Image (cartoon, helix red, strand yellow):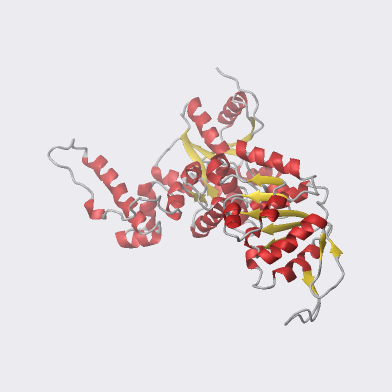
Amino acid sequence: MTTLQPNGLHVLVVDDEVTTCRETVKLLKRLGYESSYLLDLEKVERWITLHQPDILLLDVEFPGDMNGGINLLQALRRAGHLHPAIFLSHRGDSGTVVDASRQGMVTYLEKSASESALVAALEEAKGALPHRFDPDLPASEQVLGASAAFRETMQICRDFAPLLDIPVLLTGETGCGKNLTARLIHQLSPLCDKPFMELTCPTIPEGLAESHLFGHLKGSFTHAIADQKGIFELADGGTLFLDEFGDLKPDVQLKLLRVLDSGEYTVLGEHRTRHSRVRLIVATNQDIPAKIQNGEFRADLWHRIQGLELHLPPLRERSEDIALLANYFVARFISGKPGRAHVLSPDALRALQRHDWPGNIRELDYRIKNICARSKTIGIEAWQVENALPAPAGEHTQQPKAEELPLPTHSDKILPWKEYKTTKEREYFDRIVELTGGNIKRAAELAGVDRKKIYEVRGTA
């Protein structure tokens, strides 16, 4: 018998059999979990609100309600409680499993399951722990990751944050989090209570870059009908983040170099010189040395902003963080949407981790929004994720026709009819679901069956 060290996670057991509860709690504590139990379904939601356990271990059947645990989980999900749930039951029929998975169940165990099976289920549940989204939290508390690459990046941010007199250069692929990293550096710095201003350079209208950066006076050029403050003045005393600064025109690059060298700039239409008290952070995903060779970027400006350089790793190099980020984006999607609840299953998270993510964190965010928006169920399964992701390069997207399913030949090992029928029935519905892009309603119409039939045969939500 093995006793593990406490892991800080709290498991709530919900079962109407007091002996089962006590034995399960004893086992969980030996496995290193804090544990509590409840016998009454009606007390669960209030208890969860007060005590916030990490994982739920729910019996399916209760007196007077053979699906009491499933109905309870549905109510909890709708109320915003997204704790990973493991179901225990004496029965393991496919209909019960399907109903449970649609409510965001992590896994399903028979009550006679071994201790090792329970340990494995708890490990899966730990991997599906949800993230709670709080729109009022600063970036420093929203940046998520556990990988070595992420931890190294965060340490560099802390090291750079107090060095206010040296520009910070953020490099990396599109969508890898440069904007959030800039905000993090600002919030970790002594300027955290001062302005943080951001300007995306490619969005500046042609010929107006100098005005956007340094401002202008009324009448200084055509259509200058009023005085306008530039981004440097708006950010005075705080942090200015120039995103995609590699797109700045050469003449504006020269003026930016002057600000970096002397702290001085001039408002268009004004003769006096102003002084900048701005901490500058710039970001690019371009090959600036190549632009220098082509005469499109000033070498002296490039050298001037390379004082503190931080390269952000692409998401494929920190795959350990995908589950954390995915759960965060799910929580953000459902935030403020009453009655909306979604939970990524462990298999769904593994499907996300297998993807290469060329668009990095931004692509993951968009894909999660798409998956959640299309999902009609609380539990999101791997097939839903796979249907929302593009096929790997070189993979044939044309699906074989359903009627091409092979029949037995004289050389096959003949299976019992019932077993063969069950296998081919699932293949048939899997093909139709694939052909319809995961649209269960359309698949059911084509097959001439009720949607419940497809859920039952495929054993998925």
Which is nearer the eye, 362 or 68?
A: 362
Residue 348 x %, y %: 48, 45
Residue 104 x %, y %: 52, 47
Q: Residue at x 73, y 69 (%)?
A: 210
Q: Report the side of 193 relative to 156 (left or right).
A: right
Q: Where, quadrant-wise, is the N terminus in this rendering?
A: top right
User: Which quarter of the picture shows residue 97?
Assistant: top left
Q: Residue at x 71, y 60 (%)?
A: 198
Which is nearer the eye, 337 or 226?
A: 226
216 over 171 or under it: above or below = below
Residue 224 x %, y %: 76, 80
Q: Residue at x 55, y 29 (%)?
A: 20
Q: Report the side of 113 relative to 233 (left or right).
A: left
420 over 182 or under it: above or below = above
Which is nearer the eye, 457 or 191?
A: 191
Q: Residue at x 63, y 50 (%)?
A: 171
Question: Is residue 437 in view?
Answer: yes
269 over 48 or under it: above or below = below
Residue 439 x %, y %: 40, 59
Q: Report the side of 130 relative to 87 (left or right).
A: right
Farthest residue to the top: give it. 1
